[in-house]
Amino acid sequence: MTADTSAPRGRRRWYLAAALGASAVAILFATVGDGVEVPDATGFRRVVLDVGHQLVWALLGGAFAVAAARGRWSGVSQALAVAGGVTYAIFLFAVFLWN
């Protein structure tokens, strides 16, 4: 008698597809740009605006890649996803509120 592994295998495929999609967006933002222009930004705000969006997608890609490798959402996946969310919040703050 063998165990049914179809559910984890299917889940791994979805996690892998999400990891590849998020990584593709990160690469697109790193090469082409994300279209966010704030011409008066300087210093750390400029750094956040230049790399923040691509870092968000790279962290999400990493979260899904870890989940695909393990076959389940784990603490590491969660930490990477939360880091992506925090990074995105900082990025949005830099775009709209930081003066």
Image: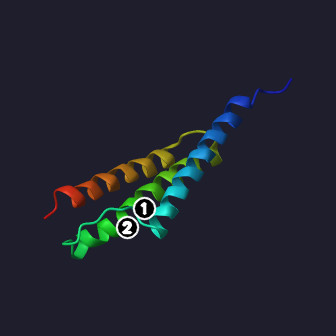
Identify the image quadrant of the C terminus: bottom left
Position of 29 compared to 88: left or right?
Answer: right
Residue situated furthest bottom in the rendering: 43
Q: Quadrant of residue 10?
A: top right
The residue under the point 42% across, 62% down is 54
The image position of residue 41, as x and y in percent, is 21, 71
To which quarter of the image does residue 6 belong?
top right
Q: Position of residue 68 (x, y in %)?
A: 62, 45
Q: For the N terminus, which image quadrant?
A: top right
**Residue at image location 29% in from the left, 58% down from the top:** 91
Could you say which is closer to the camera, residue 64 or residue 32? 32
Helix, strand or loop at mark 1: helix
- Mark 1: amino acid: Gln
Q: Seen from this angle, which residue lies furthest left?
A: 99
Q: Is residue 47 left or right of residue 71?
A: left
Q: Residues within 10 Å of mark 2 (few under 14, many from 20)?
A: some
Residue 28, percent from left and from top: 50, 62
Q: Which residue is mark 2?
A: 51
The residue where tag 1 is placed is 54
Alpha-carbon span between mark 2 and mark 1: 6 Å
Where is residue 71, by image quadrant? top right
